[in-house]
Image: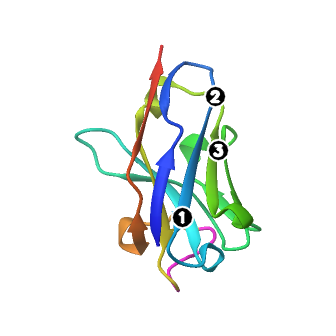
Amino acid sequence: VQLQASGGGLVQAGGSLRLSCVASGRTFSNYHMGWFRQVPGKEREFVAHISRGGSATYKADPVKGRFTISRDNAKNTVYLQMNSLKPEDTAVYYCASIKDGRFRIYTPASESDVGSWGRGTLVTVSS
C-alpha cells in the first residue's frame, strides 16, 4: 500500500493540527495503521495506532489526552488530530501500515512492525 501524509505546518503552542494520510494501491480496510514521529538526530518513535475497523486505538503516553487517531475506510484515510500542541511535539510525522499479525492493541508498534511508510509531514510548534 502507498501512503501519502499531509497536514503538517507551523502552529503556536496550545494550537491544533490535523494530519491526514491517504492510502492507495491495496484495500485500505485490510490494514492496521499507525503514526510515528522523528526529531532530527533521534530515533523514530511511536505515536498512535488504530485497528483495521477503527474500534481499537492506542497512543503513546506523551500524547494521551491530546492526540486522537481515527480512520475513514470509505476515504482510505487515517487521521491524527493533535490538540494542545507543545514545542516538544515538533517532529516529522509519518503514517505507516502495520504488518499483518504484528498489531497488538495495547503494545506500541515498533519500526519492525511496519509494512509501508508514507512520506513524512513536518509539524513545527513554536513557543
Name which residue type carries label 1: Ala
What main secondary structure does the magenta stretch of the protein show? loop
Q: Mark 1 vs mark 2: which is more N-terminal? A: 2
Q: Amino acid at mark 2?
A: Ser
Q: Is residue 57 above or below residue 39?
A: below
Is there any visible trace of residue 60 in the rendered image? no
The residue pinned by badge 3 equals 64
Query: At which x and y percent is residue 75?
Result: 69, 61
Residue 95: x, y in percent? Answer: 48, 56
Task: Give the farthest residue toward the bottom.
Answer: 101
Query: Where residue 127 sits: x, y (%)?
Result: 48, 13
Q: Mark 3: which amino acid?
A: Lys
Number of numbered labels in the structure image: 3
Q: Nearer the viewer, residue 87 or 117?
A: 117
Q: Secondary structure at mark 2?
A: loop
Position of residue 58 relative to residue 65, above or below, is below
Asked if marks 1 and 3 touch (Cβ < 8 Å), the reply is no
**Which numbered disc, 2 or 3, marks the residue that appears first in the sequence?**
2
Residue 98 located left or right of residue 105:
left
Residue 85 picture quarter: top right
Which mark lies nearer to you, 1 or 2? 1
Q: Which of disc 3 and disc 1 is earlier in sequence?
A: 1
* Magenta highlight range: 101-106
Measured Cα–Cα span from mark 2 to mark 3 = 15 Å
Q: Residue under circle 1? A: 23
| Pointer 2 residue | 16
Rounded to the nearest angstrom, the CA distance separating label 1 from label 3 is 25 Å
